[in-house]
């Protein structure tokens, strides 16, 4: 598998929903082959940030750069074509379609496109998540929560992204499944993928991340290594409720 540079950078992003100012000058970097975790309480703007990166929401000021190229405000399909994929909170799989059909849709949508990335084969997704191979003809709505999360990740990976955005991937999952998904995230970083991990599971984030950002009220209020954050009782108490 050939990977691009995979550097994602956001600089000075301000995003509004209507009259509500959600992101206040947010800046962070996700280097190639690293997991960067974004932590914070519910409602502080984490999901708005990933939605702004993929152009579900439009920033009023600031820039989003992929491999040094400005992609701010570009159409979502173009951002995906350039190599950014989102696994949304809540999975949002197509419940009436089979596992294989869910994985095939992104490939069908890309037919005829010129792309800077090389798509995965569906078999590669099954190698990454063997559980899905055994469920390949089952409807997604009949899968467990953990299997649906694997499918949501597989659907994003089939496009062969350089940058993977994960919004609360451990939400509602049993510890054994969280461990399995964590292992896959680590493997993706090892082969050169860049991962922005939005997560409430503090220990999962600490175990996976190379660098951690903490957000509060739409701003980045702390950046450090996982080890430093783990030892910073003031930041954990003030911004993470620990």
Image: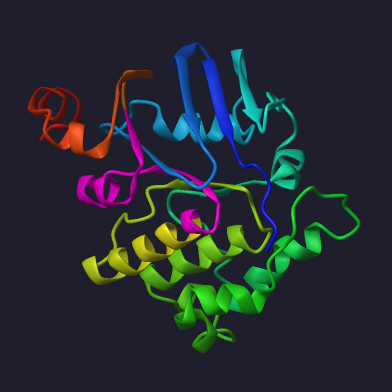
Q: Quadrant of residue 77?
A: top right
The stretch drawn in magenta includes residue 232? no
Residue 229: x %, y % from top left: 19, 32
Q: Residue 199 or 140: which is nearer the viewer?
A: 199
Q: Is residue 98 visible?
A: no
Q: Quadrant of residue 241?
A: top left
**Quadrant of the frame with the C terminus:** top left
Residue 168: x %, y % from top left: 37, 48
Residue occupying image coordinates x 33% and y 44%: 199
Question: Can you say whether 181 is above or below 198 in the image?
Answer: below
The stretch drawn in magenta includes residue 196? yes
Question: Can you say whether 82 is above or below 108 in the image?
Answer: above
Residue 135: x %, y % from top left: 51, 85
Q: Is residue 12 visible?
A: yes
**Which residues are the magenta region?**
189-213
Residue occupying image coordinates x 25% and y 71%: 176
**Quadrant of the frame with the N terminus:** bottom right
């Amino acid at each position: 598998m050939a990977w691009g540079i995979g550097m994602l950078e956001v600089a000075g992003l301000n995003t509004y929903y209507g009259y509500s100012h959600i992101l206040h000058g947010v800046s962070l970097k996700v280097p190639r082959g690293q997991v960067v975790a974004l932590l914070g309480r519910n409602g502080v703007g984490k999901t708005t940030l990933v939605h702004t990166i993929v152009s579900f929401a439009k920033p009023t000021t600031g820039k989003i750069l992929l491999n040094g190229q400005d992609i701010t405000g570009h159409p979502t399909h173009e951002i995906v074509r350039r190599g950014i994929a989102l696994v949304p909170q809540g999975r949002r799989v197509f419940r009436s379609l089979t596992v294989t059909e869910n994985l095939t849709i992104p490939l069908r949508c890309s037919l005829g496109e010129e792309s800077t990335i090389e798509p995965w084969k569906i078999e590669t997704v099954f190698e990454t998540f063997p559980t899905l191979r055994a469920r390949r003809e089952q409807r997604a709505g009949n899968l467990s929560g953990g299997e649906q999360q694997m499918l949501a990740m597989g659907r994003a990976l089939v496009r062969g992204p350089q940058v993977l955005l994960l919004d609360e991937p451990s939400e509602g999952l049993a510890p054994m499944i969280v461990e399995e998904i964590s292992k896959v995230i680590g493997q993706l970083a090892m082969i050169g993928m860049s991962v922005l991990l939005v997560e409430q599971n503090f220990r999962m984030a600490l175990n996976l991340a190379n660098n951690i950002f903490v957000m509060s009220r739409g701003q980045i209020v702390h950046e450090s290594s996982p080890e430093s954050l783990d030892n910073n009782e003031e930041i954990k108490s003030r911004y993470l409720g620990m």
